[in-house]
Amino acid sequence: MTDWKLFDSELLVAPGAKSNLAARPTVRDDLLPDKDVAKSTLDECSEEIDALQDRLYAEQKRSLLVVLQGIDTSGKDGTVRGVFNRCGPLGVKVTPFGRPSELELSHDYLWRVHDAVPRKGVIGVFNRSHYEDVLVAKVRALAPPEVIEQRYEQINAFEKHLTENGVTILKFMLHISKDEQRERLQARLDDPAKHWKFNPGDLEDRKLWDDFHAAYEIALDRCSTPHAPWRVIPADKKWQRNAFISAIVRGTLEAMKPAYPAKTWKPEDYKIT
């Protein structure tokens, strides 16, 4: 297996450091130049994630939350398919966060998020997350500036609460270039089978590219904490993106060391007739 700790150290936003997205490449051929090696890494890690998830589910003591954030077309759906496709549906819960419903808007902004946090034994994957409330909400002025300002520390406290109660958190920002986004949006227009993915509103967000990146930098800087740090994943090459994330997820699960519970009975005492 490729050294996941090297990936992690290179892609981590160290708590207290500046994320500086403009200086972070969206392709990392220096870390993973070979597509075949990346595919082999993904296959091996996905298989091992499935095995580790089985132990996590049997153990029923802790959970893993994977947060995927990124601008439109950055590959959140593709990451879910690529990294977790081998896992059985029993132990993996994927939650996409779109526009809040009327019910959700009648509660505080973290209510719907807390409700989706994976229970013990489960890997939870957030496709977008509570960070939308300091990203879209900030860029689109959906809440007053002073309210947005309060949310960074509220999010940090929320995530600390989760980690202190058995939830390990991995946060990945999928980092693509503006040119790559243009190509992916164009591909959705050119292929009738992908028309359902195209949203004209994405073009309005694209006009606010710099504003969104500025909002991301603030969120990464303010909310990369010792208990829940951010990783910025180069995502122009899908095969690199999936290999990086699968290796870090696998390494994190291995470090958690989930174990099957001890038996309270002896197999030899039973005979199946």
Image (cartoon, helix red, strand yellow):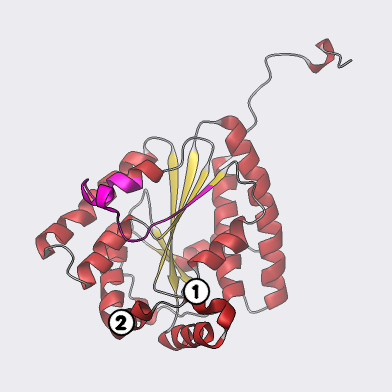
Say which element carries label 2: helix
- Relative height, residue 18 to residue 44 (above, below): below
- Relative height, residue 164 to residue 155 (above, below): above
Give the CA separation, mark 1 to mark 2.
17 Å
Residue at the spot 23% in from the left edge and 56% down from the top edge:
152
Which is nearer the N-term, disc 1 or disc 2? 1
Q: Amino acid at mark 1?
A: Trp
Residue at the spot 33% in from the left edge and 70% down from the top edge:
19
**Residue 155 screen position, x and y as percent:** 27, 51
Classify 10 Å Cα crowding around label 1: few (below 14), some (14-19), many (20 and above): few
As drawn, the label of residue 204 is 2
The quadrant in which residue 91 appears is: top right
Q: Is residue 239 left or right of residue 110?
A: right
Quadrant location, the N terminus: bottom right
Q: Is residue 221 left or right of residue 196?
A: left
**Residue 110 screen position, x and y as percent:** 27, 48
Quadrant location, the C terminus: top right
Q: Which is more toward the observer, 98 or 168? A: 98
Q: Is residue 7 magenta?
A: no
**Residue 262 screen position, x and y as percent:** 66, 22
Q: Which span is picked out in magenta?
A: 93-113
The quadrant in which residue 114 appears is: top left
Q: Amino acid at mark 2?
A: Glu
Residue at the spot 30% in from the left edge and 82% down from the top edge:
204
Q: Which residue is mark 1?
A: 196
Q: Extreme right residue here?
A: 273
Q: How many marks?
A: 2
**Residue 148 screen position, x and y as percent:** 17, 60
